[in-house]
Image (spheres, helix red, strand yellow):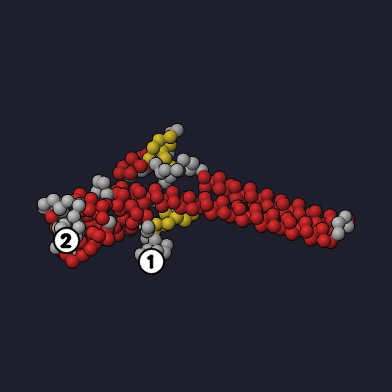
């Protein structure tokens, strides 16, 4: 489920995700650092339209000037060529700058959309204190596309390419992945808690079968998922 950047009523938002929104002037906005102006996309499109119109007007002015110079013979052919080249260079430079600005805004929108959706999923799935460890893995499976003029989170397949997967399906994929079991709330893939394994030891001193979910999450947060996978790899099916 993609999160709206703003909603008129908090009742439209899943109860578990309402803490991610804050009220401003009668509306509720997603709490995302740096995302204070939800009209940025519209302004970017308006700016693009205005820039295109200005460029077309400049091109028309150039054509009129060249035609006048040619008809009236006020300038030598060399001067006309120089003027035409100057305008062409100026027009090309303006177009490049406009494209660069639009690309920067597109990148910003992509980051904000992916960050908001991934953060919401991590907050919903992770056990307390483990959302930070889960977030990078969720974020890596998302990108953003403009659909009907709105920035929308798109799920990437395992090959890193856009897929038909939904946010809900990606969520279930993480729930079913044994590698993430210690980080997921209520995961059936995690082992039973016995003694206290702590989070300070390495693979040779820590027994995952004797760790609670909180201790497993703490171990992953400190050492990373790769270290956890090496720790439990030889014992799959025994935790």
How many dots with numbers?
2
Measuring from the top left, give residue 164's x and y in whole percent.
Answer: 39, 62
Looking at the rendered structure, the secondary structure element under dot 2 is loop
Residue 22, compared with residue 55, is above or below; it is above
Q: Give the residue displayed 39% in from the left and 41% down from the top.
A: 31
Q: CA distance from mark 1 to mark 2?
A: 33 Å
User: Can see residue 125?
Assistant: no
Quarter occupied by residue 192: bottom left
* Residue placed furthest toward the right: 73
Q: Quadrant of the C terminus?
A: bottom left
Measuring from the top left, give residue 203's x and y in whole percent.
Answer: 19, 60
**Numbered disc in front, either 1 or 2:** 2
Instruction: Between residue 200 and residue 110, name the one nearer to us.
Output: 200
Q: Give the residue displayed 27% in from the left and 49% down from the top.
A: 130
Q: Which residue is mark 1?
A: 159
Q: Which residue is mark 2?
A: 204
User: Can see residue 169?
Assistant: yes
**Residues at badges 1 and 2 in contact (C-beta under 8 Å)?**
no
Looking at the rendered structure, the secondary structure element under dot 1 is loop
* Residue placed furthest toward the top: 25
Q: Give the residue displayed 14% in from the left and 63% down from the top.
A: 238
Instruction: Between residue 23 and residue 237, name the one nearer to us.
Output: 237
Quarter occupied by residue 59: bottom right
Instruction: Bin the neighbour count of mark 1 within 10 Å (Cα to Cα): few under 14, some 14-19, many 20 and up.
Output: few
Measuring from the top left, give residue 178's x and y in whole percent.
Answer: 23, 60
Measuring from the top left, give residue 17's x and y in whole percent.
Answer: 33, 44
* Residue placed furthest toward the left: 195
- Is 142 positioned to the left or the right of 84 in the image? left
| Precedes in sequence: disc 1 or disc 2 | 1
- Is 137 positioned to the left or the right of 36 in the image? left
Q: Give the residue displayed 38% in from the left and 40% down from the top.
A: 21
């Amino acid at each position: 489920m993609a999160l709206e950047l703003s909603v008129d009523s908090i009742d439209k938002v899943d109860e578990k995700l309402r803490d991610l929104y804050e009220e401003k002037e009668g509306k509720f906005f997603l709490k995302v650092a740096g995302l204070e102006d939800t009209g940025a996309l519209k302004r970017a499109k308006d700016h693009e339209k205005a820039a295109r119109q200005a460029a077309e007007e400049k091109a028309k002015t150039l054509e009129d000037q060249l035609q006048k110079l040619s008809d009236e013979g006020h300038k030598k052919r060399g001067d006309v060529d120089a003027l035409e080249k100057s305008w062409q260079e100026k027009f090309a430079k303006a177009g490049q700058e406009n494209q660069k600005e639009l690309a920067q805004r597109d990148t910003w929108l992509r980051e904000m959309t992916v960050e908001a959706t991934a953060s919401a999923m991590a907050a919903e799935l992770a056990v307390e204190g483990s959302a930070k460890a889960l977030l990078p893995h969720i974020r890596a499976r998302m990108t953003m596309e403009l659909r009907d003029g709105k920035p929308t989170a798109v799920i990437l397949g395992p090959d890193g390419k856009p897929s038909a997967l939904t946010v809900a399906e990606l969520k279930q994929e993480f729930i079913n992945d044994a590698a993430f079991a210690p980080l997921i709330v209520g995961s059936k893939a995690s082992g039973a808690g016995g003694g206290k394994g702590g989070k300070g030891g390495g693979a040779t001193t820590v027994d995952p079968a004797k760790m609670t979910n909180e201790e497993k999450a703490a171990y992953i947060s400190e050492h990373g998922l790769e270290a956890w996978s090496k720790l439990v790899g030889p014992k799959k099916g025994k935790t």
